[in-house]
Image (cartoon, coloured by chain):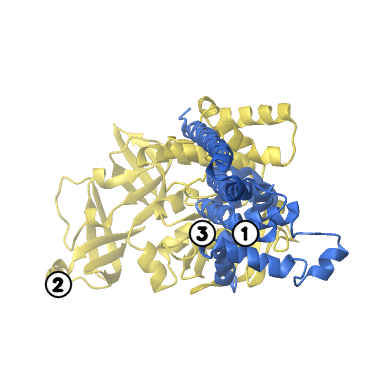
Amino acid sequence: MIETESLNYRAGKFFMHDISFRVDKGETLVVLGPTGAGKTVLLELIAGFRHPSSGSVKMDGRDLSVEPPEKRGLGFVYQDYLLFPHISVRENISYGLRAKGVGKAEVKRRVDAIAERLGITHLLDRRTRNLSGGEQQRIALARALILEPKALLLDEPFSSVDPNTKDLLMRELLRELGIRNLPVIYVTHDQVEATQVADKVAVINEGRIVQVDLPEKVFSAPKSEFVAKFVGTRNIFKGTASRIDGSTVVTIGPVEVRSSVSIEGKVHVTIRPEDIIISKDKIESSARNNLKGRVTSVVEKGGIIFVTADCGIDLTTAITRESLSQMRITIGDDVYFVFKAASVNLF
Amino acid sequence: MATALSCLLGIPLAYVLARVDFRGKGVVQSIIDLPVVIPHTISGIALLVVFGRMGLFSEQMSAMDLQFEDHVLGIVFAMMFVSCSFVVNAAREGFEAVDERLENVARSLGATRGEAFLTVTIPLSASSIITGAVMAWARAVSEFGAVVIIAFFPRVIPTLIYEKNLHGGLSDSMPVAALLIVICVSIFIVTRTLAAIWKRRQEEPQ
């Protein structure tokens, strides 16, 4: 278990105020916030690269704040991975073991083992130049995990990976975290990523934690305007998908929606608000999904109106101000939400 | 010897200048640059005033049985004084170009600050440091002004040339001058070649 107790930090104009949270073994805390909110600084404070002006970091009750970074035993992966450019991939991965003075044969055995697990054996003798983002990420992860750290700190681990490989790498990362039972602190600005990995989400803004909650809670019940604005414009759910008569039916709580993505099992569901059509009367349409609900909120953000209705799940749609005044939608109205199966994204 | 001492003292100083912000950093930086801009005879006079037989520290120096004036130590010190800034400035630039977060990563992997410096920072800034050291060496070998004032004897090559020229004219001084040129050119060629090989090894894709 890793925990911070009212961490305060100041560097020039930048402040971090009263950061307190705890992450248990096997739990992943996602620190979610916009760029410049202080996410990386927070990780660096925990790792010991920066020193808080007050407060402490504790690992299983032991005070880490008094120890230098090399004694803390925490794995750290920066968003640009920062592989050592002057040595080979193998030397990168074995760096920590060599610093600890582990014998040559043992080092080789462990490097080979982890490289095989992560599918990077063919890269071991290469230099780190000219590797893809995904390859670099795996190497950086191997370099940190080979030391069997007591906790893992990940700084936007997917920001330098192209979207096609991201899904594969995400599954690998979840698998590696799953077998290790570590406390993980995972920093990102991407809510989709957050829902994929988070057991808990801490929303951070301007150096303060504004909400710590279960991911569903953060997205469905934001406690402040900032959180609502930052996370509240997307429909993200967890559900179970099954294939029925050649199409995919996803059960999300009490609601079933159809998707054109062919997968089965536990899935994350996203529906872009602008893909949902709202109507006060039932409309006949070729769209496969037609849900009835009651409007619970009407919020304007950047000239766009976000209308949220409780259809068994909270769905949000985006409409223009013009259509809002034409349809005269207000809170409490019964409405129909219509969207195509192709608009329901599953992953 | 002067170059080795410059590196030994100058590299840690350069690291501090590159990584730490402190009050008076500008002053320290200016003092390091000073020997480059002032005439070298002034450097020699300044050193003589401080470390000479009649200098400020003359008592302490004789207590420690150290002698600078007309002594090898004085020559080394004068050379260091005028050439150290090359090492410090080159090394500082080299260090500044190394991402500090690479050192952070090394430390999170269990390396102490010193180990991270030796295994990550130094290798990544090696070419700058070597260039600086070669420049410092070149400066030291050709130093005349400061050396001639603090220690005319024992003679180094530039003072030897000067003396030969005074007493025997061009014909006497030319062979020594030619020798110095040959030595300098060969050293430059060798270091350049080594640097090129080093760089190519770093950039190899495989």
Residue A124, image x, y percentages = 55, 28
What letter labels the chain drawn in blue? B
Residue A313's quadrant in the figure?
bottom left
Q: Could you tell me how far apart the alpha carbons at marks 2 and 1 are, in whole angstroms?
A: 87 Å
State which mark lies toward you, 2 or 1.
1
Give residue B146's mark.
Answer: 1
Q: Could you tell me how far apart the alpha carbons at marks 3 and 2 are, in whole angstroms?
A: 43 Å
Is residue A18 something one can see in this rendering? no
Q: Estimate how packed mark 3 is, as few (under 14), some (14 to 19) or many (20 or more) residues with alpha carbons within 10 Å.
A: many
Q: Nearer the viewer, residue B169 or A341?
A: B169
Give the color of chain A as drawn: yellow
Give the left or right position of residue A201, taking residue B160 as reference. left
Residue B17's quadrant in the figure?
bottom right
Q: Nearer the viewer, residue A189 or B65?
A: B65
Which residue carries the number 2 mark? Answer: A325
Residue A73, image x, y percentages = 69, 50
Q: Are marks 1 and 3 on the same chain?
A: no
